[in-house]
């Protein structure tokens, strides 16, 4: 059996969380350390060729935010604008699922189809909520007919042409080619289905559900799910770095990529993951740090309910990236050093450009 087809091995979930009640104490950074951090962040900003760039770092609760870019300063200061998270929104969705599981509202092992179509027999080996959030459902990255519908708006808002009812219908009609839980394949489709299953299970619209269970409890007052306007939101740009693109409209893919947030709200979100003790959602925050599957050669790729997890010399690093048609984001945190990083920019890069490697290296080295 090759590495590509080796079955994923999910750990029991939900279950008893790891003992992750705090962070390693390494002392608060002094002024000399802070000056070094500012220089590192300024170098990171300079390395990213985008109209607007923000690198926001928290170390043991002490924040350093540096911003810049190739464009003139926008009407809203870069560090106060809201940015599109794209797929980094999945970390919010994973935390919501962990919260609903932790409070007993539902179980991660529930079949998604039964929630979306009550009375439907679950069948043998059904796709569960846990499969959907861990990308082991067997669903493709996008529904089979997505590209045909999206093509007329491919360079503006392709997701807007695929509404919620089509996402649900495509899932219920999908013919499986492999048993759920046997292979990892990243799927925006799967996480979008999860969102609709959660709204069906709770009889609550997605915006209200995420706001009530995640955004408000964590105090994310400037985060939201829809475009706000030029007075609040950053403007994205195409790969050329100069052509603006309209705000993202996600259609039926809200759970997979709708979150917008300011750098400071993103640091608040990440700081809650660093030390869940005494915080709202403490049980869910601990749960999303627990590894639930390993894949690849030697099972070197580790995933939690919401995060990719890589090793460092001192301990694990958790991270997730995201991109829309005109913006990119990187979120990450390291409990071992009490460090969190939120990086955003207003340009959609090619795969080999500097934004993600710069952000990843900065978190890994600090």
Image (spheres, rainbow, N blue to C red):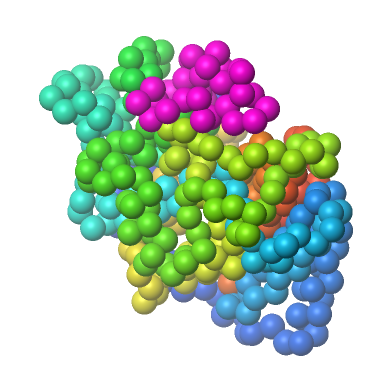
Camera-nearest residue between 167 and 142: 167
Q: Residue furthest left?
A: 119
Q: How many marks?
A: 0
Relative height, residue 109 to residue 288 (above, below): above
Position in image of residue 301 (x %, y %): 57, 41
**Quadrant (top left, top right, bottom left, bottom right) of the C terminus:** bottom right
Relative height, residue 114 to residue 273 (above, below): above
- Identified at 38% across, 19% down, the residue is 170
Question: Quick check: 118 left or right of 15?
Answer: left
- Identified at 80% across, 85% down, the residue is 32
The image quadrant of residue 69 is bottom right
- Identified at 33% across, 15% down, the residue is 173
Question: Quick check: 48 left or right of 296?
Answer: right
Position in image of residue 45 (x %, y %): 81, 59
Residue 348 colored magenta? Answer: no
Position in image of residue 354 (x %, y %): 81, 46
Relative height, residue 77 to residue 96 (above, below): below
- Identified at 20% across, 53% down, the residue is 104
Camera-nearest residue between 41 and 145: 145
Is residue 85 at all visible to an observer of this figure?
yes
Position in image of residue 154 (x %, y %): 64, 24
Tell me which segment is drawn in magenta: 138-167
Is residue 317 at all visible to an observer of this figure?
no
Question: Quick check: 121 left or right of 317?
Answer: left
Relative height, residue 263 to residue 128 (above, below): below
Residue 163 colored magenta? Answer: yes
Camera-nearest residue between 150 and 334: 150
Camera-nearest residue between 223 and 172: 223
């Amino acid at each position: 059996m090759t590495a590509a087809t080796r079955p994923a091995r999910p750990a029991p979930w939900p279950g008893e969380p790891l003992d992750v009640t705090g962070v390693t104490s390494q002392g608060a950074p002094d002024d000399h350390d802070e000056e070094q951090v500012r220089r590192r962040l300024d170098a990171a900003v300079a390395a990213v060729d985008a109209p607007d760039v923000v690198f926001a770092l928290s170390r043991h609760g002490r924040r350093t935010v540096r911003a810049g870019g190739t464009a003139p300063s926008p009407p809203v200061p870069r560090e106060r604008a809201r940015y599109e998270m794209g797929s980094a929104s999945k970390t919010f969705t994973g935390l919501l699922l962990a919260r609903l599981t932790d409070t007993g509202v539902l179980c991660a092992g529930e079949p998604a189809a039964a929630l979306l179509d009550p009375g439907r027999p679950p069948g043998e080996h059904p796709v569960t909520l846990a499969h959907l959030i861990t990308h082991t459902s067997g669903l493709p990255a996008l529904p089979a007919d997505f590209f045909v519908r999206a093509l007329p708006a491919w360079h503006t808002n392709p997701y807007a042409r695929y509404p919620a009812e089509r996402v649900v219908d495509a899932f219920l009609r999908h013919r499986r080619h492999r048993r759920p839980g046997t292979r990892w394949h990243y799927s925006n489709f799967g996480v979008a289905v999860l969102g609709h299953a959660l709204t069906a299970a709770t009889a609550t619209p997605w915006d209200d559900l995420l706001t009530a269970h995640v955004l408000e409890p964590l105090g994310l007052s400037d985060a939201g799910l829809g475009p706000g306007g030029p007075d609040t939101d950053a403007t994205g740009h195409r790969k050329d770095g100069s052509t603006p693109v309209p705000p993202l409209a996600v259609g039926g893919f809200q759970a997979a990529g709708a979150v917008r947030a300011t750098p400071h709200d993103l640091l608040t979100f990440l700081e809650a993951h660093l030390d869940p003790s005494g915080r709202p959602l403490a049980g869910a925050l601990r749960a999303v740090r627990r590894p639930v599957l390993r894949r690849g050669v030697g099972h070197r790729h580790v995933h939690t309910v919401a995060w990719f997890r890589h090793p460092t010399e001192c301990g694990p690093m958790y991270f997730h990236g995201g991109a829309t048609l005109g913006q990119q984001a990187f979120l990450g945190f390291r409990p071992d050093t009490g460090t969190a990083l939120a990086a955003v920019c207003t340009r959609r890069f090619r795969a080999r450009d500097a934004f993600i490697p710069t952000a990843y290296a900065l978190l890994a080295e600090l």
